[in-house]
Image (tube, rainbow, N blue to C red):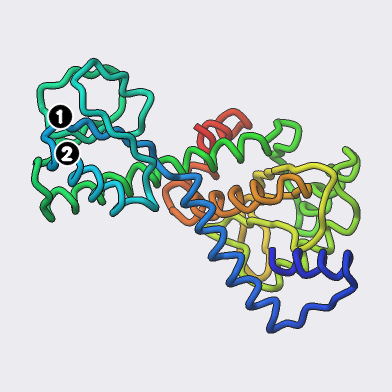
Amino acid sequence: CSIYIARKIFDYFQFLITEDEITFLAVYIANNMRLLQNIKSKISVLFLIPDYNIITSELYDYYSEHFDSDIKAVLLTEKEKIESSAYDLLITTDQNFDTYGSAPVIYINPFINSADENHLKEIIEQLKKQKRLQYNRVCLASFMKEEFYYERDFSDFDEAFSMMTDQLQQKGIASQDLKEDILVRAKLSNTVVNSIALLRPCVCVSSAHSFSYLKLKEPVYFNGEKISAIMLLSFSENKFLDYLHVMEYLFYQISDKNKARKILEADSFQQLEDLLCH
């Protein structure tokens, strides 16, 4: 994406970004993407701490500030029935309060201690990971359409790849430039993971975002590696950030050998969608 942004800067301002500056830009973007993901994956936490006077204030202030980058915190001191589904996590010192809903409840000691702190850190990280995955699944679902799911036999990669990009051109989604741009991107780093080629553009913007999937009846070779399926992404300018999330999520999925195997075994669009989006 740093190359894409460098190209945009040149298009708008006729200012050429050097290779060293593109590398710096890539690091800057990666750091900001992590910050953005952290903001989006913040979990909402309700602290239910009965009014112990100064202890209540100290407990809430300590944990809410300690986990400030990970949580959005609310304090409640009065005992009442809580709808836990309004929050991702409930933290309380009172084991007798009434709750309903699905959010997990964590009991802590009225006095700050490292055991509670470490336990909360572990639970919060798990919930953040789940929230990130859910967000990425939603992004991918917006990219997926059954018309771009294929299961066919091809003699080589070029034939298969041309079919996929030709379909996007016929639908008015992509231009001929997309094909060349994807092949350029594939030379920059490895795009094959567990027999699945994850192909995406470098700088070429399409008129719409899309996810195409081809399940090959017989494996073909791409860049010296045998592949059994091709995933192909395109993005529009207004979906660029979602595209980055989808790309990261797909790479995460196919990097797991068991998940990659299940993806390759899927024999319909519905099965693939269920595996990736639900």
Judged left or right of residue 25, residue 94 is left
Judged left or right of residue 222, residue 120 is left
Query: Is disc 2 placed on a helix, strand or loop?
Result: helix
In this view, the residue in front, 113 or 199, is 113
| Identity, as a three-letter code, of the amino acid under mark 1 | Pro
In this view, the residue in front, 132 or 162, is 132
| Identity, as a three-letter code, of the amino acid under mark 2 | Thr
Q: Which residue is mark 1?
A: 50
In this view, the residue in front, 125 or 167, is 125
Query: Is disc 1 placed on a helix, strand or loop?
Result: loop
> In the figure, 12 relative to 248: above or below?
below
Q: Position of residue 242 (x, y in %)?
A: 64, 46
> In the figure, 252 relative to 89: above or below?
below
Q: Which mark is residue 86?
A: none
Crowding around mark 2 (Cα neighbors within 10 Å: few <14, some 14 to 19, many 20+) is: many
Which of pointers 2 and 1 lies earlier in the amino acid sequence?
Answer: 1
> In the figure, 209 relative to 189: above or below?
above
Query: Mark 2 and 1 residues: CB-CB less than 8 Å, in contact?
Result: yes
**Residue at the image point whose x is 64% and y is 56% from the top:** 198
Q: Position of residue 24 (x, y in %)?
A: 63, 77
In this view, the residue in front, 163 or 112, is 112
Crowding around mark 1 (Cα neighbors within 10 Å: few <14, some 14 to 19, many 20+) is: some
Q: Which residue is mark 2?
A: 56
